[in-house]
Image (spheres, rainbow, N blue to C red):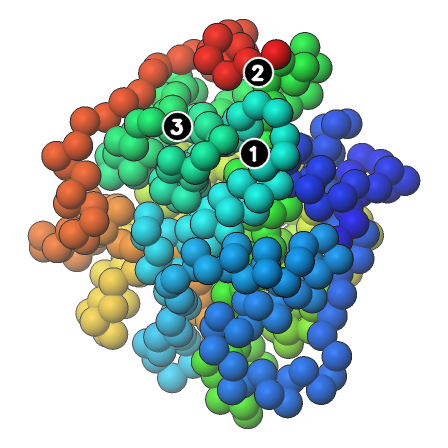
Amino acid sequence: MKLYSTKDRNQEYSLKEAVLQGLAPDGGLFMPTEIPSFPPDYWYSFYDKSFKEVCLDISRLLLSDALTDSDIQYILSTLNFEAPLTTISDNISVLELFHGPSLAFKDFGAQFMAQLMSLFNRDEKGDLTILVATSGDTGGAVASGFYDVEGINVVILYPQGKVSELQARQLTTFGKNIQALEVQGTFDDCQQLVKQAFVDESLKHKVRLSSANSINIARLIPQSFYYFGAFAQLDKEHPPITVSVPSGNFGNLTAGLMAKRMGLPIDIFIASTNINDVVPQYLETSEYQPKPSVETLSNAMDVGSPSNFERMQELYGFTWNHIKQDIIGYSFDDDQTIRTIKSVYEQHKYILDPHAAVAFLGMKQFLQTHQHHHGIILATAHYSKFKSTIDLALEFDTDLHPSLANLLDKTQQKEIISSEYEQLKSILLDKYAVN
């Protein structure tokens, strides 16, 4: 896999360079120079494959020029959980992406990345420092995936008071090579701090930095796996498939678009957002206008300037009409989210987390005019991570997932910082400088 920067198509990078740097030297995002597709005869046996076989096929398609087959199989050995497809009505299924260690879809990316980065870092001098901003689930997944991985330190920035208590505990209770920084600001502030660090040449000369959120191309590769995995669970003969993706930073949807480029027959994507709706507004008007994020109950989607929108535009040649052919955008508020959690439970005895509820709303709106489609919504986190919201919606005390209950007895380790860049830079230089 060869890659280029979204700011300069003429400069090529290797997969190792892209993964270890995270962000291109010019501040752009890495994109594959091409996304290969499976040959037509691949699909003859596709529906008989296991999820692990599908993951291996995709990895070989994308990475065989950069990694040996034994390396690919070693990296995939850590993905010991799957994404079951659960049907909750005649025309809607839920792809459950919360069966990994942190109960969030980002476990797929974090587990894969930890092993890939460890492999690439073996011959390098000095520890690699992963710097990542989280609006909710990324932090816990990255902390779990990279915990105690040799030669790699992790610094996680999260917005003060804007992630749930359990989400915060998932990233502040590890210790060892995991450091949590609680930022007095929004997720957009956290993301801006990370971007400043990556373009700060004086810092990069002293600290070996990379990222583990969706600005890193290595996050998107494994996130394409479960789109294929969903199709492998369908009947060979199925109606057109539409996928509703609860969207914040748009890495998840971008991974789905990559899966489509590889040949997966997804008909339409729905970009389902909360009131932080800059992408649905763009899809409606052709005007992209980032703005400060607003706090909602679906907090992992509280993003006002999504990084991966740049990649989405790259995939479609920055042509609005082309993007509109594959993606529809809808947005919903907290009241609609609460009502949907309640109504889905009453009708189907299924509990959606707030983000999956937004995806469900998007799918219901789409199916009003596309009755012949079958809808798949992505459930990106276990509902227990948002227990207070779920209990409010359902009006009873829901059970807490055992892995989350265990966190309540652990001590949190965190440092509170302002949204001023110099404070973050000082911490990175003091603790992680390698030369």
Left or right: 300 with respect to 202?
left
Kindly identify the residue that appears in the image at 71 percent across and 38 percent down: 17
Q: CA distance from mark 1 to mark 2?
A: 17 Å
Judging by the rendered image, the residue that carries numbered circle 3 is: 177
Kindly identify the residue that appears in the image at 66 percent across and 65 percent down: 60
Q: Amino acid at mark 2?
A: Val
Label located before the other in sequence (3 or 2): 3
Left or right: 118 with respect to 160?
right
Q: CA distance from mark 3 to mark 1?
A: 15 Å
Judging by the rendered image, the residue that carries numbered circle 2 is: 434
Under circle 2, the secondary element is loop
Dot in front, 3 or 1 = 3
State whether residue 290 appears in this view.
no
Under circle 3, the secondary element is loop
Asked if residue 171 is positioned above or below residue 309 in the image, the reply reads: above
Quadrant of image for the C terminus: top right
Task: Identify the mark at residue 211; answer none if there is no mark.
Answer: 1
Label located before the other in sequence (1 or 2): 1
Under circle 1, the secondary element is loop
Kindly identify the residue that appears in the image at 63 percent across and 34 percent down: 123
Q: Nearer the viewer, residue 213 or 68?
A: 68
Q: Position of residue 313 (x, y in %)?
A: 74, 48
Left or right: 292 with respect to 361?
right
Label located before the other in sequence (3 or 1): 3
Q: Position of residue 327 (x, y in %)?
A: 64, 61
